């Protein structure tokens, strides 16, 4: 490692630790320790990840063909007008046998360009939250309610949600995670169908088709309220409940 790489690494480590402190993280878990009784499965998943077989090209999972069909369908979808403005659709990515799934709203500019969910500014924050929980992005599954970027990142319309929702439903059905984190209002409304506000709903488990759903603030909301440590702490409180449930 040269001088510059060492300095960059130090900077990255410092900003990450500062972020954990702001979240209210009291200790750090090494990813290994979270594997618990699923250790074997996790080791296997890590092998899959290392060999490039998880995520976009996961053909060795039992549902591999079905996944390939689903992704192809999403990439060519014209079920609502949003396809006209996309560079590419963003189906989602991660471990197709994940116990923990994150559902966001819709791709933004960076996601539309790269074809991957949560890779922009909000995405970096989500990645840090996932890491603070003791996981890597590859160990969880990350998707959105809407697969194509709405113009100017406007909130998706109900007819767009309706047209796109079969894809997320199929993903949830194939993954069957132990818990879903709903990021922000669009995902929470879709999964919990509650008239209550985000502030009322966050922090309490709801349920979608028998799967516990934890609604929490969207990472973009954290970005927009960057100086507000209370909001970050609330998100971390919510994630601690998710970790408790995963342990049980
Ligand atoms: N916001 C979202 O809801 N999803 C993404 O993938 C990126 C930003
Ligand atoms: N409103 C939203 O749409 N999302 C949040 O996370 C908080 C408030």
Image: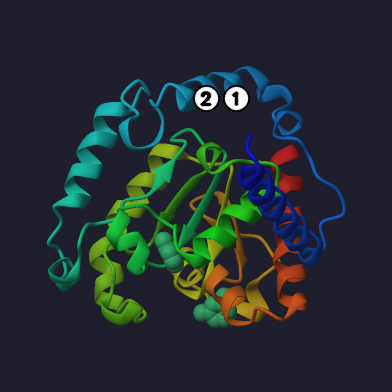
Instruction: Please say if 221 is above or below 68.
Output: below
Instruction: Please say if 128 is above or below 220.
Output: above
Residue corresponding to mark 2: 45
- Quadrant of the displayed image that contains ligand 1: bottom left
Is residue 109 in view?
Answer: yes
Element carrying mark 2: helix
Point out residue 123 in the picture as x, y percentages from the top left corner. 50, 60
Q: Residue at x 26, y 33 (%)?
A: 66
* Left or right for 196, reference 176: right
Q: Residue furthest front?
A: 3
Point out residue 98 in the picture as x, y percentages from the top left corner. 52, 37
Q: Are marks 2 and 1 in contact (CB under 8 Å)?
A: yes
Q: Nearer the viewer, residue 6 or 67?
A: 6
Point out residue 214 in the picture as x, y percentages from the top left corner. 62, 60
Instruction: Please say if 237 is above or below 240.
Output: below
Q: Residue at x 66, y 80 (%)?
A: 199
Point out the image quarter for the C terminus: top right
Classify residue 203 by image quadrant.
Answer: bottom right
Q: Nearer the viewer, residue 75 or 198?
A: 75
Q: How is the image coloured?
A: rainbow
* Left or right for 228, reference 112: right
Q: Residue at x 23, y 65 (%)?
A: 163
Is residue 196 in view?
Answer: no
Residue corresponding to mark 1: 42
Instruction: Please say if 218 is above or below 239.
Output: below
Please tell me how many numbered marks the rendered image carries.
Answer: 2
Classify residue 218 by image quadrant.
Answer: bottom right
Element carrying mark 1: helix
Q: Residue at x 63, y 38 (%)?
A: 2
Point out residue 11 in the picture as x, y percentages from the top left corner. 69, 55
């Amino acid at each position: 490692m040269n001088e510059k790489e060492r300095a960059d690494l130090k900077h990255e480590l410092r900003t990450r630790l500062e972020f954990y402190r702001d979240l209210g993280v009291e200790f750090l878990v090494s990813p290994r320790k979270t594997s618990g009784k699923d250790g074997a499965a996790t080791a296997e998943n890590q092998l899959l990840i290392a060999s490039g077989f998880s995520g976009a090209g996961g053909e060795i999972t039992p549902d591999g063909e079905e996944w390939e069909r689903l992704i192809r369908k999403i990439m060519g979808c014209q079920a609502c007008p949003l396809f006209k403005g996309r560079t590419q659709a963003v189906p989602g990515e991660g471990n197709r046998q994940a116990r923990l799934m994150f559902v966001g709203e819709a791709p933004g500019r960076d996601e539309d360009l790269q074809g991957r969910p949560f890779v922009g500014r909000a995405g970096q924050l989500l990645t840090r939250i996932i890491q603070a929980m003791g996981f890597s992005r590859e160990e969880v599954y990350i998707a959105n309610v809407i697969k194509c970027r709405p113009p100017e990142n406007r909130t998706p319309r109900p007819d767009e949600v309706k047209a796109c929702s079969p894809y997320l439903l199929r993903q949830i059905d194939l993954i069957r995670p132990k818990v879903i984190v709903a990021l922000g209002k669009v995902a929470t409304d879709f999964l919990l169908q509650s008239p209550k506000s985000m502030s009322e709903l966050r922090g309490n488990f709801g349920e979608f088709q028998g799967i516990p759903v934890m609604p929490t603030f969207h990472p973009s909301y954290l970005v927009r309220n960057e100086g507000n440590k209370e909001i970050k702490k609330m998100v971390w409180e919510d994630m601690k409940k998710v970790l408790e449930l995963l342990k049980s």
